[in-house]
Image (cartoon, rainbow, N blue to C red):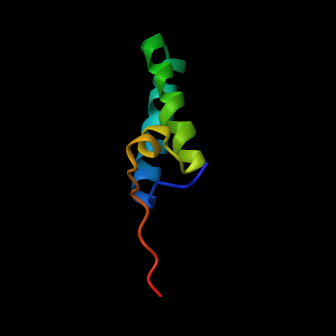
Amino acid sequence: MTKNMGGLDKSLRIALGAALILGALLGYGTWMWIGIVPLVTGLLNSCPIYSMLGVSTCPTKKN
């Protein structure tokens, strides 16, 4: 998988995913387990939907 996420995108996904999973563990609803998706994509630095759409939030390297 190619990396297609920048730092801010990655941080927000990890924080949101962790918060949703914490909510699920605390009993706020089983639907909160959906937090696994943003957490995993954030940890892997790759979003399959971004890949399909040809989107990348990675900053471009300048020489």
Q: In percent of the image, x 58 and y 46: which residue is there?
A: 43
Q: How many marks?
A: 0
Q: In percent of the image, x 57 and y 38: which residue is there?
A: 40
In this rendered view, identify the residue nearer to me: 62 or 17: 62
Residue 41 position within the rendered picture, expressed as x and y whole percent measured from the top left: 53, 41
> Toward which corner of the image does residue 59 lie, by quadrant?
bottom left
Q: Residue furthest bottom?
A: 63
In this rendered view, identify the residue nearer to me: 3 or 31: 3
14 versus 56 height, above or below: above
In this rendered view, identify the residue nearer to me: 29 or 50: 50
Residue 63 position within the rendered picture, expressed as x and y whole percent measured from the top left: 47, 88
Q: In percent of the image, x 48 and y 54: which residue is there?
A: 4
In this rendered view, identify the residue nearer to me: 51 or 19: 51
24 versus 50 height, above or below: above
Q: In percent of the image, x 44 and y 40: which residue is there?
A: 52
Residue 30 position within the rendered picture, expressed as x and y whole percent measured from the top left: 48, 11
Residue 1 position within the rendered picture, expressed as x and y whole percent measured from the top left: 61, 48
Using residue 44 as the reference point, say whether residue 6 is left or right of it: left
55 versus 61 height, above or below: above
Using residue 62 as the reference point, say whether residue 45 is left or right of it: right
